[in-house]
Image: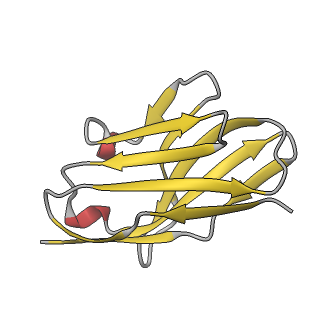
Amino acid sequence: QVQLMESGGGLVQAGGSLRLSCAASGTILVTYNMGWYRQAPGKQRELVATITRGGTTNYADSVKDRFTISRDNAKNTASLQMNSLKPEDTAVYYCYFETIRGGFWGQGTQVTVSS
């Protein structure tokens, strides 16, 4: 059974930084795309950033130039460096791995940005 575990969430003041990490347990032979999504209260889950196995990245317009997604293929981990955080970034952040065995979601980690 594959499980994803996020870490690194918390409370930060506007303008601050946080780094989220996502690690997989269980057997994953190949992970294709990795991504970070977020869901704010009363809103739908939205894409934040994705990265392909080859390192091509894609960002939501709202986080471009502030967030950076990265991955370690050998360790099957993904990270999201979040800088210049804004109150509107407050949400539960989820990682998602698209693997040869299907897609898997983490349980989510809360990020709260105070003004």
Pick whichever, 61 or 89, lies toward us.
89
Q: Residue 58, how many percent across, how many down?
A: 47, 32
Quadrant in which the C terminus is drawn: bottom left
Q: Can you say whether 1 is above or below 54 in the image?
A: below
Q: Residue 92, how many percent across, how many down?
A: 45, 70
Quadrant in which the N terminus is drawn: bottom right
Which quadrant of the view contains residue 112?
bottom left
Q: Can you say whether 85 is above or below 43 in the image?
A: above
Horizontal side, residue 54 vs residue 17: left or right? right
Q: Can you say whether 27 is above or below 86 in the image?
A: above
Q: Residue at x 49, y 54 (%)?
A: 21
Horizontal side, residue 56 vs residue 18: left or right? right
Q: Residue 11, how many percent across, how many down?
A: 27, 74
Pick whichever, 7 or 51, lies toward us.
7
Q: Residue at x 26, y 64 (%)?
A: 88
Pick whichever, 74 or 44, lies toward us.
74
Horizontal side, residue 77 vs residue 13: left or right? right
Which quadrant of the view contains residue 25?
bottom right
